[in-house]
Amino acid sequence: MTDRTQSPHKRQGPRSRDAILQAASELCREQGYAAVTMETIAVRAKVGKPTLYRWWPSKGAVFLDVLLEQVVEPAVELPDTGDIVHDLRSWIRGFADLFDDLHARQLLTGVLGAAQTDAELATMLRERIQRPLQAGNRQRISAAQVAGDLPAMDPVLLEELLISPPWYRLLVSGESFTHAYADSLVDAVLGHPQGA
Amino acid sequence: MTDRTQSPHKRQGPRSRDAILQAASELCREQGYAAVTMETIAVRAKVGKPTLYRWWPSKGAVFLDVLLEQVVEPAVELPDTGDIVHDLRSWIRGFADLFDDLHARQLLTGVLGAAQTDAELATMLRERIQRPLQAGNRQRISAAQVAGDLPAMDPVLLEELLISPPWYRLLVSGESFTHAYADSLVDAVLGHPQGA
């Protein structure tokens, strides 16, 4: 029997994968999300298009991985310092920082835009990013409500009241989402006095 | 001088325009938004592609007009019965009805998805739909706050707390937006007791 873990192909797999994600990310910075194609990614990464399609069904799926590795893991998780109100405030302010970063914004709007007409990509996006983050957030919110640190309200609703306005501004209205607006949002949802 | 308003081309304009929007709408119902192209719209409407491109720069722009004529005008405006709380409730419930209609949902996600990587379409969408609706809503909300019928809060924030969760569910999480959820949302934002 051949030890397939030792095959050159297998050994090269992860290196090619990194090279491909790196190439996609560079092209997006240089040309903007819309201009990048599977073709240009393959050329820049020096791999064949079949290699690309073996791992990813679409350009959106490649950028979903770029998004996961370069943007989401450090930036979109609710922090945990022990002070939930402080954590929610930092978390929502984090969206302002994220959307201020042109590369992150291109990746987010590019992948979310493509997901609107690509059900497979939408499913991947939800299963790999949105649902796991949401599940963790809702658990934290519920626990803080039990401890009396957050207002009693359906935790699903409380989370969505906080997280929806930044996404609405990014994807629908195009208005900028600032730290000041993030703070008013958190104050309003948590029932804190306005203009404090 | 020739009277250009009497030219056959000018007289046929509006009829062709209706035929094109009708063709685009039918194709979207039959094949789904993603499958429709400028080519297939032109063939179905029996016009040349140059005619299509004379009026619309992209498929997204054609569907923005379909959206405006078939979906948005009747469905997305805040009603005015004199009872603002009742009106806000009907308005937010209206998003549940809108998103339940497969054709409307396809048009909304198709055009909004395309707008993420098409700045010209995003501008058209905001100038022709989102901003005029928003301006009207904010005026109504401000007036109701002055009358003491809505809680004192930045009217921009109040409007976005109500309108963002349906869009977040449509465009990001994919969870369904129901009448029951719409009612809890309105109650939470207006500070009404939960579970009433």
Image (cartoon, coloured by chain):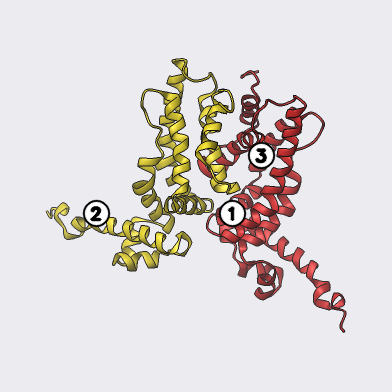
Chain colours: A yellow, B red
What residue is rendered at 64% in x and 22% in y?
A: B191
Q: Say which residue label 1 marks.
A: B110
Does residue B143 appear left or right of residue B109 in this picture? right
Residue type marked 3: Phe
How far is disc 2 from disc 1 in space, using C-alphas?
35 Å
Q: Say which residue label 3 marks.
A: B95
How far is disc 3 from disc 2 in space, using C-alphas?
45 Å
Q: In this view, does A195 lie above or below B129?
A: above
Same chain for mark 1 and mark 3? The answer is yes
Residue type marked 2: Pro
**Picture coordinates of residue B33, whole percent (x, y):** 59, 56
Of residues A30 and B152, the one nearer the viewer is B152
Q: Is mark 2 on a helix, strand or loop?
A: helix
Q: Say which residue label 2 marks.
A: A14
**Picture coordinates of residue A19, whole percent (x, y):** 28, 59
What residue is rendered at 69% in x and 50% in y?
A: B129
Q: How many marks?
A: 3
Q: In this view, does B174 lie above or below B122?
A: above
Of residues B175 and A129, the one nearer the viewer is A129
